[in-house]
Image (cartoon, grey):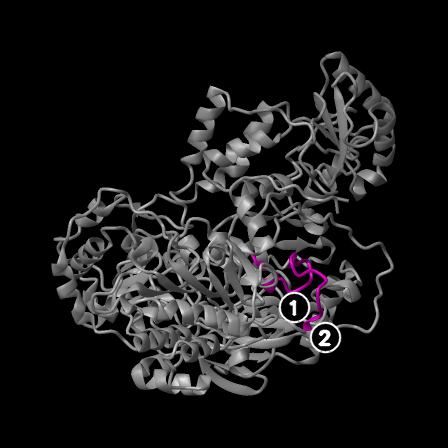
Amino acid sequence: MSVRRLAEIQPASFAFTPENKAWAEKEITKYPPGRQASAIISLLWRAQLQHDFWLPKPAIEAAADMLAMPYIRALEVATFYTMFNLEPVGRHHVQVCGTTPCVLRGAEAIKQMCRNRIGPEGHVTGDGALSWVETECIGACCNAPAVQINEDYYEDLTQANFAKLLDNLVAGKPVKTGSQIGRTSSEPAEGSLTALTTLYGADGKSGPASVKP
Amino acid sequence: MAKIIIDGKELDLPPEYTLLQAAEAAGAEVPRFCFHERLSIAGNCRMCLVEVKGGPPKPTASCAMAIRDLRPGPNGEPPVVETNSPMARKARKGVLEFLLINHPLDCPICDQGGECDLQDQAMGYGADSSRFAENKRAVEDKYLGPLVKTSMNRCIHCTRCIRFATEVAGVSELGAIGRGEDMEITSYLERALTSELQGNVVDLCPVGALTSRPTAFHARPWEYVKTESVDVMDAVGCAIRIDSRGREVVRILPRLNDAINEEWISDKTRHVVDGLKTQRLDRPYIRVEGKLRPASWPQAFAAIAAKAKATQATKIGAIAGDLASVEEMFALKGLMEGLGVANLDCRQDGSKFSPEHGRASYLFNSTIAGIDEADAIMIIGSNPRIEAPVLNARIRKRWLKGDCLIGVVGEKLDLTYQYNHLGAGADGLAAFADHPPVQKTKPMFILGAGAAARPDGLAVLSLAAKAALSLGVVKDGWNGFNVLQNVASRVGGLDVGFTPGPGGLDAPAMAAGGVDLLFNLGADEIEIASGAFVVYIGSHGDRGAHRADVVLPGAAYPEKTGIYVNTEGRPQFGDRAIFPPGDAREDWAILRALSDALGAKLPYDSLVGLRAALAAAHPHLVALDAVAPADAGVFAALAKLGGALDKAPFASAVGDFFLTNPIARASRVMAECSALRAGRQTLQAAE
């Protein structure tokens, strides 16, 4: 993580859409009187979703105004959480997991591909389609290496399938979320390696004592 | 009460005490950076680690753990705290090593050097060398306005400045953005701070990250001569320490005084010092052919004596200004009495406070510490935020504690706390004139000086007294009728009776041409009509000196000793830090010499003699630092006075906070602050 600052080029204004405004007002009522400022993360997140997945200064101020909290308090929250993008991102914002299990399984190659294909971290491609950053563990270690693109996870990446994934995303073709090699959740990738029957019996219900030699 | 053993000493302490407080009670020293008695507990510096038995089996931050959080031993033994065990010392050494990892080694060029907590504690608890071979963190310096200079590489993230701004000053302008190693203290988009108390963050900063911009690189702390004195920028009378170097005052710092300012002072108090060096009157002047020409003291006295001889006593008058000490006003009053003059006034703003209504009618009767006990406060015609910022912080402190109702009659302004607006003018107050008593034990009025300085000031005062009696603000055992004076000399002047004698004129009448010879003791806020021969005794070439026919150079407050009575009626002693410039003299000495020249010689030759005479006439004024309670029985008579009320809304007695007196108007720093507040852009040289 590096120093996070507001983007240099900012839109002139920001206003919640009527639906988002209604949603935000409902969100605020979830908190007890005098504690409405607790809704700041929800509001900032909604503002970010509305605003091409990045949070400009007017949006931070609009959220703070809605909660009658000082701007600096809202800015503290927006700069604290890396889920808030303070600079514009691409339509497909790739967050590459760079923590140990993913690195052991080839995340370095994925990052290098991003550098080659998209550019340096935080850079948005000319067509506005792609941008990438490295993140800490995204919690998909069993299916490492993994990336998060917008709201979806893509796992079991190889250089080949990741390149295809990016091509399909940019081209607007349908893509498969989750594992890219077709395994279900995080079951063993090369078929079952463990015979459950040896431990729990043929019916899977008995204890070890029921095992017959 | 709970038993606890600290460093082998068993104590019986309130269970809500933190371990840090308990250690202090036991006389053990615990180092700290983020903890501050008057701020909330953050517990993030980890410097105050101690070893505890009966708590978590690891070093514990003593500032954030209370005695009641600890459990007794298996046989009911009290919990044990070791503040200086090898484990505690090793833990602190580790913490300090981490703090120093990113702290630059720039002590030789740092203004905090010599009064730096980190420096001191690194000596006490630190390692002798660094094991850190990597790059240090680098942080951009932030702009926080003309008073606070930043050097953010030095910041150790104690967050004291953030907590001060949010809690005490009441402006949430400082914050910490980012997190972890990238955390940075800043204001929103680096806007200048707007608090009148922002200078205090410099004192709070335990390292050199926030330093005073106006005194940057002026001197080292050990070079100063430190003089304990009292502030005269407002009527609160904050305790200050004047640090001087050679013939110059370099800086002013707050001193601890729980009865008045706790440990804060306003920016005007702190940063007015450069005004002491500019626009000074350092020799007498006489107006010749419309222009002030330098003269000698005998020439100046001769010119005054000639005029005095040719003027009837009824055509002579004297006005005392806002920064005058009690001694000067007492001496000037003695001189005027010697000349048979009844035209005396210390109220250049035309305020209607007067000793004839009783001392309680112009004092902050509950005392400033009484604000902590009040459960309802009505502020009338005052903006305490700029009239007395430190007192306003006290009101905010009371408000934050909860269960305190605050009402305002007057301007609707941001006072840093919530209040009910009860009306803009006297009619808002009139609604309470025949009100049943409030269901509060200690209700309080704070009547601003501005409300009594209007033409109908006496009627407002009377109405306030009536409302105070009917609401129960004044009752047996509690006098909550408080007047917030806005100038340092006012209560002292009223106490020595520097008000018109029988048949005498008041200040506006004298200034409007009622007298032919006017002695002006530093009154710069009053427009004196042409015609009168004005003798100005003061320190700065301000409005008063421009209008004068003879200028006698006096001493500013750090250049003389004097008694100042604050708005509570508490006489305090202001000590001398430096000498007046050039031929300027202490004001009492000028008046003594002048009395000889005018043939009405004052009966004392020294300041000691003057104070003896003052003590004989007004014994309570020499009982320093004590408040002599005023008789609360005067309000009934005051309430009966009545009078016609003006419809006009109340206005504060202070227009521009930064430019209220000649010293502040001579200060470049104050001018910059004033321009910033007014939204005027100042052009700055590229630095």
- Is residue B210 highlighted in magenta? yes
Residue at (46, 37) in percent of width and height: A67
Q: CA distance from mark 1 to mark 2?
A: 10 Å
**Can you say whether B255 is above or below A203 in the image?**
below
Q: CB under 8 Å between callouts 1 and 2?
A: yes
How packed mark 2 is, by other alpha carbons closer than 10 Å (few <14, some 14-19, many 20 or more), is many
Residue at (32, 54) in percent of width and height: B513
Q: Which mark is residue A184?
A: none
How packed mark 1 is, by other alpha carbons closer than 10 Å (few <14, some 14-19, many 20 or more), is many
Write the start and end of the magenta stretch as one range.
Answer: B198-221
Left or right of B565? Residue B144 is: right
Residue indicated by mark 2 = B125
Q: How many marks?
A: 2
Q: Element type at marker 1?
A: loop
Q: Position of residue B53 (x, y in %)?
A: 58, 77
Residue at (32, 81) in percent of width and height: B620
Q: Position of residue B485 (x, y in %)?
A: 35, 61
Question: Which part of the image, by quadrant, shows the N terminus of chain B?
Answer: bottom left
Query: Predominant secondary structure in magenta?
Result: loop
- Res B398 quadrant in image: bottom left
On the same chain: label 1 and label 2? yes
Q: Element type at marker 2?
A: helix
- Res B402 quadrant in image: bottom left
Q: Position of residue A112 (x, y in %)?
A: 87, 31
Residue indicated by mark 1 = B47
**Can you say whether B104 is above or below B225 in the image?**
above
Left or right of A60? Residue A200 is: right
- Res A80 quadrant in image: top right
Q: Amino acid at mark 1?
A: Met
- Is residue B580 highlighted in magenta? no
Q: Amino acid at mark 2?
A: Tyr
